[in-house]
């Protein structure tokens, strides 16, 4: 089975940096995803990590440590529009367990 | 179509009635997922179709829930004898099976189900 944990809520200030952590336990691992979901909207893809290390994409970066079952999403130069839920998701490994499972999401509040 | 299409966008039903939700994935996407999202909660996995393989139904919460997919096209999620606890947004996502694109799920706008 798969278990994914991330903080329920976080608050940060416009222009600052915030790090959202995600830990997971899976019987097999074949990639970790981060999605952004604004209230009332569908999730949209942010990043994908399958190897250890940092993936940078503009103001957003995602880090993975497979040995620790740990990832974080780093958001820099926060803007008010970054107020959203951030969902960590993991893909299992194998023909019968390669589905993608989501954590409960972290609601990020940005203060002016 | 250009994106994942779900219908209806909103559905209000009475307790005990059956409902059918439809998902039209992106053309050529072999993988299709259904998730349930209750208000303020995360995405709860329901079922996963991959090509012609048997679907992974491990997330369906009860035998009142079922889903079908015709080939690599439209999928329908059916909820029989709806209960108030079934009220949620039902999200469908599809992804390609090949290359880097297989790692990106594209979501529909969802069906908001309200059971009175």
Image (cartoon, rainbow, N blue to C red):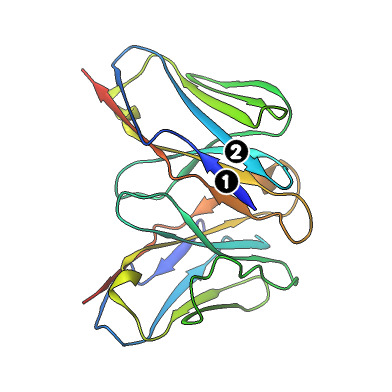
Numbered circles on residues, count? 2
**Mark 1 chain:** A
Q: Position of residue B104 (x, y in %)?
A: 60, 45
Q: Quadrant of residue A13?
A: top left
For image coordinates 65% across by 60% down, the residue present is B29
Query: Is the residue B66 above or below the residue A3 in the image?
Result: below
Answer left or right for A104 relative to B88. Answer: right
Query: Is the residue A57 above or below the residue B32 in the image?
Result: above
Q: Position of residue A45 (x, y in %)?
A: 52, 40
Q: Residues within 10 Å of mark 2 (few under 14, many from 20)?
A: many
For image coordinates 50% across by 38% down, the residue present is A5
Disc 2: which residue: A24
Callouts 2 and 1 on one subunit: yes
**Is residue B31 visible from the viewing direction of this image?**
yes
In this view, the residue in front, A32 or B84, is: B84
**Mark 2 chain:** A
In this view, the residue in front, A10 or A31, is: A10
Answer left or right for A51 relative to A38. Answer: right
Disc 1: which residue: A3
For image coordinates 64% across by 26% down, the residue present is A64
């Amino acid at each position: 089975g798969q278990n994914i944990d991330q903080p329920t809520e976080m608050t940060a200030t416009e222009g600052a940096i915030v790090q959202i952590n995600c830990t997971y336990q899976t019987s097999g691992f074949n990639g970790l995803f981060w999605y952004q979901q604004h209230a009332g909207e569908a999730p949209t893809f942010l990043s994908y990590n399958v190897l250890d290390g940092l993936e940078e994409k503009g103001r957003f970066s995602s880090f993975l440590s497979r040995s620790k079952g740990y990832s974080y999403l780093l958001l820099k130069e926060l803007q008010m529009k970054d107020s959203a839920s951030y969902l960590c998701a993991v893909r299992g490994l194998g023909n019968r367990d390669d589905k993608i499972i989501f954590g409960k999401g972290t609601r990020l509040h940005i203060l002016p | 179509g250009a994106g994942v299409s779900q219908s209806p966008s909103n559905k209000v039903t009475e307790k005990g009635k059956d409902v059918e939700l439809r998902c039209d994935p992106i053309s050529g996407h072999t993988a299709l997922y259904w998730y349930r999202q209750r208000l303020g909660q995360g995405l709860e996995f329901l079922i996963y179709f991959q090509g012609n393989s048997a679907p992974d139904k491990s997330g369906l919460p009860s035998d009142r829930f079922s889903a079908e997919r015709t080939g690599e096209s439209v999928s329908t999620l059916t909820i029989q004898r709806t209960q108030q606890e079934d009220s949620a947004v039902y999200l469908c996502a599809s992804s390609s099976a090949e290359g880097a694109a297989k790692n990106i799920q594209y979501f529909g706008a969802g069906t908001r189900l309200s059971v009175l």
